[in-house]
Amino acid sequence: MVDQGRNNHTEVIDFILIGFEVSPELHLLLFLIFLLVYVMILLGNIGMMTIIITDPRLNTPMYFFLGNLSFVDLFYSSVIAPKAMTNFWSESKSISFAGCVAQLFLFSLFIVTEGFLLAAMAYDRFIAICNPLLYSVQMSARLCTQLVAGSYFFGCVSSVLLTSTTFNLSFCASRTIDHFYCDSRPLERLSCSDPFVQKMVTFTLSIIIILPTILVIIVSYMYIVSTVLKIRSAEGRKKAFSTCSSHLGVVSVLYGAVIFMYLTPDRFPELSKVASLCYSLVTPMLNPLIYSLRNKDVKEALKKLLGKKNGIL
């Protein structure tokens, strides 16, 4: 029986991504929506990185983290969007076994990295508001580099564990994935082997990743709110809160969508797809908009950059 499972596992050379189960007439509309969102992701995140790199005034820890956040958003959406758009016009809707492995690995790497980056950004705001006199000392270039490197490291380790345990399953029941990209939960449903180890790894990683990052964010903002409420002037309180509102908006969208997806029962796959869409494409699109619209420094840097281009033209 084990040998049969192994044989079936080795015979799988590709998978079929069902995507969104809608009528063919809506494929063009969905393709255009995905294309518009992806173009906005490219323009927004590349623009944000360009502004941060070219403007010396943005050479601070907060924008160092924000630049890395834009990089992560750009790449994990690029892992998903092009293939999803291609499948709207493809009859086979297939993805190779190696392509599916790569998609799950890269997406997991970048989405976990983003969670740790958001926690690092919350800590940065905590130091900036609660200990402003020590900010430049505590948030040194070395610490910022270590926090970012640690985010990528934990993202890579968790991705290796999740991907290896997922594709160690035997896929002999079906090769049709009820999703628009290769994710661990729909792949788990295809397995005809015992998914206990894979489920335990997924659950453990969720606990290790989500709980500490959320805890850092919550504790940081508890101290931030406590400190801001002690500021006597309304203008001072408004300025302090404005530096955090963008970050809170990004955190709410990302974690809200992730938690909703994992709490959605397997019998409602379409709801799970909508939640996945929120954090895989909508969040990377909104992040640059949220930070640029509510951030005076970014808006001034953008005006300066556009002014230089107009001068050249």
Image (cartoon, helix red, strand yellow):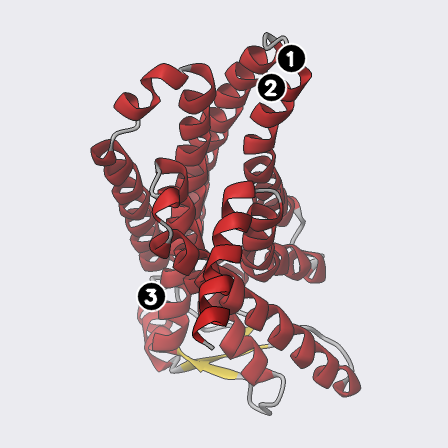
Dot 3 surroundings within 10 Å: few (below 14), some, or many (20 or more)?
few
Q: Mark 3 sits on what residue?
A: 2
| Residue occupying the point 71% across, 57% down | 271
Image point 50% across, 30% down: which residue? 214
What residue sits right under mark 2 in the picture? 236
Image location of residue 81, percent across then percent down: 53, 72
What's the CA distance linking mark 3 and mark 1?
Answer: 71 Å
Q: What is the three-letter code of the residue carrying label 3?
A: Val
Mark 1 secondary-structure assignment: loop
- Rendered-image quadrant of the N terminus: bottom left
Q: Which residue is drawn at 39% across and 34% down?
A: 120
| Residue 272 percent coordinates (x, y) | 65, 56
Res. 19 image quadrant: bottom right
Q: Which of marks 3 and 1 is in front?
A: 1
Viewer-closest of 87 and 73: 73
Residue 233, numbered label: 1
- Tell me, yes or no, whether the two marked residues, 2 and 1, touch with CB atoms within 8 Å: yes
SS assignment at label 2: helix
In the picture, measured across the screen, residue 189 lies left or right of residue 55, that is right
Q: What residue type is labelled 1?
A: Ser
As drawn, 9 above or below 236: below
Quote the CA–CA distance across marks 2 and 1: 5 Å
- Gap between marks 3 and 2 measured at Cα: 67 Å
The x, y position of residue 291, in whole percent, is 55, 46
- Please name the amino acid that badge 2 sits on: Gly
**Mark 3 or mark 2: whose residue is earlier in sequence:** 3
Label 3 vs 1, first from the N-terminus:
3
